[in-house]
């Protein structure tokens, strides 16, 4: 029987993990954050009255075939409009999911139908089915409402986040809870700690389900810190924040040790105020998995994309190989 693997998160990090894992005989469930508030998500919330769909779209595409008709559909769903009043910067896939939700009268049914059309391997589940906002309280009494404001801070991004929560608090999607309870492995990350990873754990019932699960709990450490979220964070601080919200220990942590390109590091330091994360994890506390997990590609930004994206990313095949080897043993 195939191992049941749950991947928690959102964004490009979750995309990389899912893209690699789908090539193995696994039963995969992606549980994605629904707290996005930047780019087209604001339009989906304010103009269409729907939950944001970008992280859902990315997860669907990650689990879809990459060749033949599947490859054509991937390109179509990933197409980003570079012009047009009201649609510039929006992907076709997001608009398709909005339209499908209106036709079917349900976002949940729309995601299931899109999964069928894209012939994905596995399932994609929103972590919650009700609208909510991510709230961060920083040192010096600063409070920011909305994931986008945390991602691209207008305040001093060196300030530490004291507390993060959802407003309003919303219950978890029952299907997501069921998947977590049945999982053989739960994978968290890579991704921005406060805006991609924690929003899934903050939804009512999720952290408790992960805590109570007897499965292995994997954390894939980011390549770079994030200004406004994890400025100055070491690897152990990332892990401790996650464990604080889970109220249980992680079992395995994957850390990239491949050298990062100097040119890109200089760009990150000057333009993003981001830096490589120091690995200070104690080897006697975790099963540390170190190695070259770096993608050989440098991801240049799409001029029509209004949001900041990671230039350095994990390699899907390298991550999947390491994860599957652990699962098999």
Image (tube, helix red, strand yellow):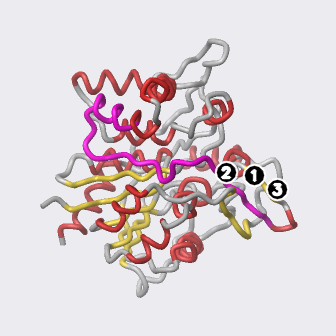
Q: Measure the C-alpha gap from mark 2 to mark 3.
A: 21 Å
- List the residue tagged with mark 1: 145
Q: Measure the C-alpha gap from mark 3 to mark 1.
A: 15 Å
Q: Secondary structure at mark 3?
A: loop
Rendered-image quadrant of the C terminus: bottom left
The mark that comes first in sequence, 1 or 2, is 2
Q: Secondary structure at mark 1?
A: strand
- Residue at the image point whose x is 67% and y is 49% from the top: 147
Foreground: 285 or 101? 101
The mark that comes first in sequence, 3 or 1, is 1
Foreground: 158 or 51? 51
Q: Residue furthest right?
A: 140
The mark that comes first in sequence, 2 or 3, is 2
- Residue contact at pointers 1 and 2, CB within 8 angstroms: yes
- List the residue tagged with mark 3: 156
Q: Is residue 166 above or below residue 212?
A: above
Q: Secondary structure at mark 2?
A: strand
Label 2 crowd bin: few (<14), some (14–19), many (20+), radius 10 Å: some
- Residue at the image point whose x is 39% and y is 43% from the top: 296
Across and down, in percent, residue 63 comes to 31, 41
- Residue at the image point whose x is 36% and y is 31% from the top: 114
State the extent of the magenta-drawn residues as a range. Answer: 111-138
State the mark number for residue 133.
2
Q: Residue furthest front?
A: 105
Q: Position of 155 compared to 7: left or right? A: right
Q: Nearer the viewer, mark 2 or mark 3?
A: 2
Foreground: 50 or 261? 50
Quadrant of residue 183 in the image?
Answer: bottom left
Across and down, in percent, residue 53 comes to 51, 37
Q: Measure the C-alpha gap from mark 1 to mark 2.
A: 7 Å
- Residue at the image point whose x is 45% and y is 80% from the top: 249
């Amino acid at each position: 029987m195939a191992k049941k693997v749950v991947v928690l998160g959102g964004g490009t990090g979750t995309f990389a993990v899912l893209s690699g894992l789908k090539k193995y005989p696994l039963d995969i469930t992606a549980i994605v954050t629904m707290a996005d508030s930047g780019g087209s998500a604001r339009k989906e919330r304010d103009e269409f009255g729907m939950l944001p769909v970008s992280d859902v779209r990315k997860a669907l595409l990650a689990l879809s075939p990459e060749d033949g008709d599947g490859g054509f559909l991937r390109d179509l769903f990933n197409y980003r409009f570079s012009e047009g009043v009201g649609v510039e910067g929006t992907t076709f896939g997001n608009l398709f999911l909005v339209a499908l939700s209106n036709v079917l009268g349900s976002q949940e049914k729309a995601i299931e139908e899109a999964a069928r059309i894209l012939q994905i391997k596995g399932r994609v589940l929103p972590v919650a089915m009700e609208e909510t906002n991510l709230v961060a309280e920083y040192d010096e009494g600063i409070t920011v409402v909305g994931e986008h404001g945390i991602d691209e801070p207008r305040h001093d991004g060196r300030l530490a986040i004291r507390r993060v929560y959802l407003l309003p608090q919303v219950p978890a999607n029952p299907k997501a809870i069921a998947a977590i309870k049945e999982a053989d492995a739960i994978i968290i990350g890579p991704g921005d700690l406060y805006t991609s990873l924690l929003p899934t754990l903050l939804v009512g019932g999720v952290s408790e389900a992960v805590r109570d699960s007897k499965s292995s709990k994997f954390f894939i450490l980011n390549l770079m810190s994030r200004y406004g979220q994890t400025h100055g964070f070491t690897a152990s601080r990332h892990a401790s924040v996650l464990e604080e919200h889970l109220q249980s220990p992680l079992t395995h942590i994957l850390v990239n040790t491949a050298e990062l390109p100097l040119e890109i590091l200089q760009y990150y330091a000057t333009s993003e105020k981001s830096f490589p994360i120091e690995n200070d994890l104690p080897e006697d506390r975790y099963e540390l998995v170190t190695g070259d997990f770096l993608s050989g590609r440098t991801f240049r930004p799409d001029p029509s994309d209004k949001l900041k994206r990671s230039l350095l990313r994990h390699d899907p095949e390298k991550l999947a190989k390491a994860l599957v080897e652990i699962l098999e043993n």
